Amino acid sequence: MAEKVWRYCEAHDITGKTVTVKIKYSDFTQATRSKTLVSGITSVEMLIDAAEILLASVFPFKRPIRLVGVTLSSLSNEGGQTSQLELGL
């Protein structure tokens, strides 16, 4: 999952500072854990390491899991500028 997120970021020349892991359980409850890095995520290895640390904080799982997701946010382009989506009117 983290590798897919990183490939998208590389393809669009963006990086991020906040890694979020979301776990959805079979009973439709969920747990979300986030970590913001001051320097930002600069490699797929950093993203994977951060996601693994966040997953470890809720492991072992006490209920069956139906979904796990990894998100990168606080995005900026490679030049350091914060990205913002624009909607065409």
Image: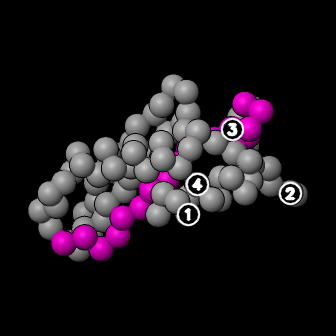
Check disc 3 and give the amino acid type. Ser
Q: Which residue is the site of mark 4?
A: 6
Foreground of the two, 36 or 43 = 43
The answer, for residue 20, to whether it is visible in the render is no
The answer, for residue 31, to whether it is visible in the render is yes
* Location of residue 70 by image quarter: bottom left
Check disc 4 and give the amino acid type. Trp
Q: Residues within 10 Å of mark 1 (few under 14, many from 20)?
A: few
> Closer to the observer: label 1 or label 3?
1
Residue at left offset 86%, top offset 57%? 88
Q: Name which of mark 3 and mark 2 comes first in the sequence.
A: 3
Q: Label 3: state its secondary structure.
A: strand
Question: Which disc number belongs to residue 4?
Answer: 1
Q: Residues within 10 Å of mark 3 (few under 14, many from 20)?
A: some
Give the spatial CA distance, label 1 vs label 3. 18 Å
Check disc 2 and give the amino acid type. Gly
Q: Are marks 1 and 3 in contact (CB under 8 Å)?
A: no
